[in-house]
Amino acid sequence: MLQLENVTVRFGGLTAVNDVSMTIGKDDLVGLVGPNGAGKTTLFNAISGLAQPTAGRIGFDGIDMLRMPLHRRARLGIGRTFQIPQPMHQLTVRENLVVAQRFGTGKVDRAHIDDILTFLNLWDKADRDAATELALTELKALELGKALATSPKVLLLDEVLGGLETAGKRHFMDTLRRIHERYRTGILIIEHDIETIMNLCRRVCVLNFGSLMADGAPAEVFRDPEVVKSYTGGAHA
Ligand SMILES: Nc1ncnc2c1ncn2[C@@H]1O[C@H](COP(=O)(O)OP(=O)(O)OP(=O)(O)O)[C@@H](O)[C@H]1O
Ligand SMILES: [Mg+2]
């Protein structure tokens, strides 16, 4: 289980994440919402090791991760995607998955890569150049595949559904549900579309100005007037 205790991240005078505590279990599929600039991506960076908290604790299955380098966190089971898909240049789709797998697990398991390629409908594109030859949905599938290749116990998904039209979104949501069940991973997903969160998650966390303002069932959280106000009132300048 991923455990955050009073995590704060500051950039100079700006508090991007403010005293956030939450737990994500292996059976959880949790939405993370909040206005632009609320600190959602920074929270992911703090968990995966790209941003250093100024205060607080981050643990996984009781192991303190706070000072661990990125690859050790990945090996403990933290997988993530990036808001802007970043395939490695001049590598094929399959090679991208292999590099991600080696980073996340320290070894190469070709059968698992084949399984991911099939599962994400990328089999026909396996030998294409990832950076130049993929359509948006395929890029997004690859981004997900790279995270899956690290054999995560908890997946942090940063707006993986963003930019997809309705049918594509529905298909991707179904894929996420199947990942959650098939690979037995906990999922924390950043997503702006409230309807998507209501459909996908039984729990949602709301960040506003870096602070966790709600953590509960979507139907209740989105009825909270303070949450509604945060959506219409904006965030950091
Ligand atoms: N490396 C950085 N240096 C300085 N400020 C940063 C850095 N990264 C993020 N910030 C600031 O921290 C705040 C939170 O940014 P963050 O990217 O975490 O928001 P977000 O909730 O992911 O927003 P969005 O929905 O637009 O992706 C913003 O004010 C942002 O400008
Ligand atoms: Mg973000």
Image (spheres, rainbow, N blue to C red):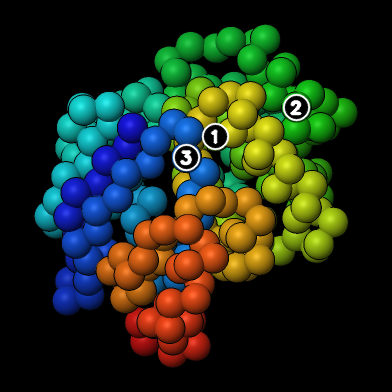
Pointer 1: what residue? Answer: 147
The residue sitting at 19% across, 62% down in the picture is: 19
Residue found 21% across the figure and 28% down from its top: 62
Which residue is label 3 attached to?
28
Residue 207 lies, with reference to residue 157, above or below; the image says: below
The residue tagged with tag 1: helix, strand or loop? Answer: helix
Q: Circle 2: is it few (<14), some (14-19), or many (20+) Cα within 10 Å?
A: some
> What is the x, y in percent for residue 206?
41, 66
Dots 2, 3 in contact, CB < 8 A: no
Horizontal placement of 82 versus 21: left or right?
Answer: right
Tell me what residue is drawn at x 17 percent, y 76 percent. 13
Question: What residue sits right under mark 2 in the picture?
Answer: 119
Q: Quadrant of the C terminus?
A: bottom left
Numbered disc 2: secondary structure:
helix
Say left or right for 165 vs 73. right
Q: Amino acid at mark 3?
A: Asp
Give the CA separation, mark 2 to mark 1. Answer: 13 Å
Q: Which secondary structure lies at badge 3? A: loop
First-in-chain label (2 vs 3): 3
